[in-house]
């Protein structure tokens, strides 16, 4: 267990600044989206729409994501993952805030389509961004940790959304619709806080631009020292004496 923990500590300590900022962004982003996704279906129901309206919203979101994923990948190759994450995240924040005030079925469907497009841009650029800012040795741990972080953040968002909505109704005496709308806006605010780490992203720091993890650095230093000692031994090895070894008499003279 101690070896496992030490390995993960070294991995996390060896990640670039961009990756550490990305973890902060992903934590805030998924807490906000987890809160929003749980409450939004209840919000649509509180508006008085039929249950099938939720299916229309989900279908519009999925259709938009399917249409935009390939163009988003091409745009990522052209403009870079850092820029596309920023553009997509800002668009998601704007659309989610608008959805919290929309009431008509047409508005809900149109904004759901726009949200699906914006979220697909972010989703299509997250993995390329992590790959650009990590070495091949780091990626297994990096992707695993990122998935665990997303799941934990979504659970925290779902739990927080339910608690906030219930607290506003029980303690503040808010109506169901008002408490749900306020909770949606809290989720938007938390997700918007994730834009701050995005603004601090630097240039991609792949394997060529960063120090390896501590264990790898120690291994490299040891290998370098061993190679240096071997080279010195070869240089200091005495020449064969021609008087002792007739084979080398023609080529070498005795240094004594």
Image (cartoon, rainbow, N blue to C red):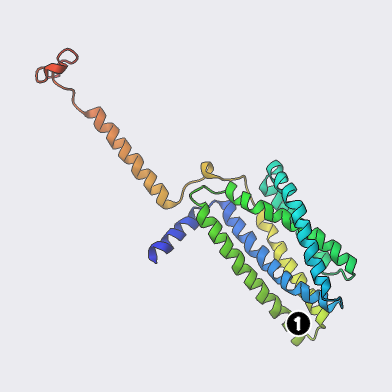
140 relative position to 75: left or right: left
Please state which of residues 199 and 122 is positioned toward the viewer in this rendering: 122
Q: Quadrant of the C terminus?
A: top left
* Residue 152 locus on image (x, y percent): 59, 69
The answer to whether any part of residue 199 appears in the image is no
Query: Residue at horizontal 80%, vertical 65%?
Result: 97
Q: Secondary structure at mark 1?
A: helix
Q: What is the number of callouts on the image?
A: 1
Disc 1 packing (10 Å; few <14; some 14–19; many ≥20): some
Q: Is 213 drawn above or below residue 164 in the view shown?
A: above
The answer to whether any part of residue 159 appears in the image is yes
Q: Residue furthest top?
A: 250
* Residue 158 locus on image (x, y percent): 67, 74
* Residue 148 locus on image (x, y percent): 56, 65
85 relative position to 238: left or right: right
42 relative position to 238: left or right: right
Q: Quadrant of the N terminus?
A: bottom left
71 relative position to 16: left or right: right
Q: Which residue is mark 1?
A: 168
Quarter of the rendering containing residue 253: top left
Q: Residue furthest left?
A: 244
* Residue 231 locus on image (x, y percent): 29, 32
Query: Residue at horizontal 59%, vertical 59%?
Result: 23
Quarter of the rendering containing residue 250: top left
Query: Residue at horizontal 68%, vertical 56%?
Result: 123
């Amino acid at each position: 267990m101690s070896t496992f923990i030490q390995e993960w500590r070294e991995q996390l300590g060896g990640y670039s600044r961009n990756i550490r900022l990305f973890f902060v962004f992903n934590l805030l982003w998924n807490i906000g989206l987890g809160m929003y996704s749980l409450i939004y279906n209840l919000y649509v129901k509180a508006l008085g729409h039929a249950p099938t309206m939720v299916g229309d919203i989900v279908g519009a979101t999925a259709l938009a994501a399917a249409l935009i994923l390939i163009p988003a990948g091409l745009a990522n190759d052209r403009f870079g993952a850092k820029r596309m994450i920023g553009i997509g995240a800002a668009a998601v924040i704007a659309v989610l805030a608008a959805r919290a005030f929309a009431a008509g079925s047409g508005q809900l469907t149109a904004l759901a389509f726009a949200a699906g497009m914006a979220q697909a841009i972010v989703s299509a650029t997250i993995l390329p961004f992590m790959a650009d800012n990590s070495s091949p040795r780091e990626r297994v741990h990096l992707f695993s940790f990122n998935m665990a972080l997303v799941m934990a953040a979504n659970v925290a968002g779902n739990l927080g959304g339910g608690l906030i909505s219930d607290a506003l109704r029980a303690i503040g005496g808010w109506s169901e619709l008002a408490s749900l709308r306020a909770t949606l806006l809290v989720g938007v605010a938390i997700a918007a806080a994730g834009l701050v780490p995005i603004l601090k992203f630097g240039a991609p720091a792949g394997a060529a631009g960063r120090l390896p993890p501590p264990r790898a650095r120690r291994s490299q230093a040891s290998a370098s020292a061993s190679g240096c000692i071997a080279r010195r031994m070869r240089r200091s090895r005495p020449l064969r004496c021609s008087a002792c070894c007739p084979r080398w008499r023609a080529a070498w003279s005795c240094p004594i």
